[in-house]
Image (spheres, rainbow, N blue to C red):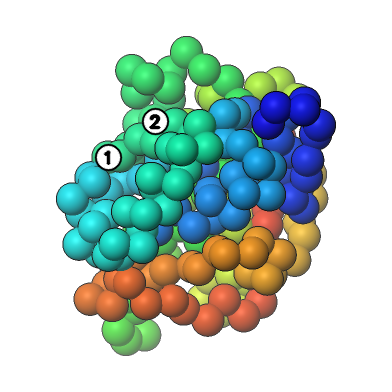
Amino acid sequence: MEDGTERWLNHYSSKQQILLVGEGNFSFSLSLARAFGSAANMTATSLDTHEELRKKYGTEAVANVEALKALGCTIMHGVDVHAMSQHIDLRSKRYDRIVFNFPHAGANVICRALEGFMITDNQVLVRGFLKNAGEMVKEDGEIHVTHKTTHPYNMWGVETLGREVNLCLVKEVPFFVSYYPGYVNMRGCTMNSDSTFHVGNASTFMFRKV
């Protein structure tokens, strides 16, 4: 951003160092970057390789990545949220905001008998993310998890998972996709990976170090 003006989109500022993890089609990152007029302070990561990204989400996702690069964003593929604090290109950096939207362990609940197992798998995912993010966030920074609050997602116990890794929930605010122009949330982990899903009731859980 050439004029140095600070620009905001909801909880996020162009002057913050922002790490976005688990990005699907990178449309959330691009929404922020376009609002800011720059992505020079942003790093957007995905578990998918570049080829997996193309296969899952098609040419639009690839175009989003290219647009982000043009705005100065650092793009990283194949980043595991459970090990990101030790990633060679991330481990020495500290961030004002670390963001994970709609984390999911990668399978659908197909019957009530399996629901408990899926909750456990997703708790492992979120706990691992929060632990790693706690090692990468600045002392006065925040870690954000956006998550559905209806059943069975409310059974994950996101606030409790944060406490288990010495993070304190400082705020929970309602999340609406419309707050982020251009953002299209994707399933990502199913046969219909390039289709969106109904968000319904959801919140952004904001954590800080204890």
Q: Quadrant of the N terminus?
A: top right
Disc 1 secondary structure class = loop
| Mark 2 in CB contact with mark 1 (< 8 angstroms) | no
Callout 1, which amino acid? Gly
How crowded is the residue under tag 2: few (<14 C-alpha within 10 Å), some, or many (20+)? Answer: many
Q: CA distance from mark 2 to mark 1?
A: 10 Å
Q: Is 160 above or below relative to 155?
A: above
Badge number at residue 148: none
Residue 194 lies, in percent from the top left, at 33, 72
Given residues 52 and 100, the one toward you in this image is 52
Q: Is residue 82 visible?
A: no
Q: Residue at x 44, y 76 (%)?
A: 196
Q: Is residue 80 visible?
A: yes
Q: Earlier in the sequence, mark 2 or mark 1?
A: 1
Q: Residue furthest bottom?
A: 111
- Give the residue at mark 1: 78
Residue, x 36% and y 63% (percent of image)? 60
Q: Residue furthest front?
A: 2
User: Which residue: 81% across, 31% down?
Assistant: 5
> In the rendering, at what x and y percent does residue 176 appear?
69, 70
Mark 1 packing: few (<14 Cα in 10 Å), some, or many (20+)? some
Amino acid carrying mark 2 in the image: Met
Question: Residue at image x 51%, y 76%?
Answer: 152
Residue lying at the far top in this picture: please name it: 92
Q: Nearer the viewer, residue 6 or 21?
A: 6
Residue 106 placement (x, y as % from top left): 31, 63
Residue behind mark 2 = 84
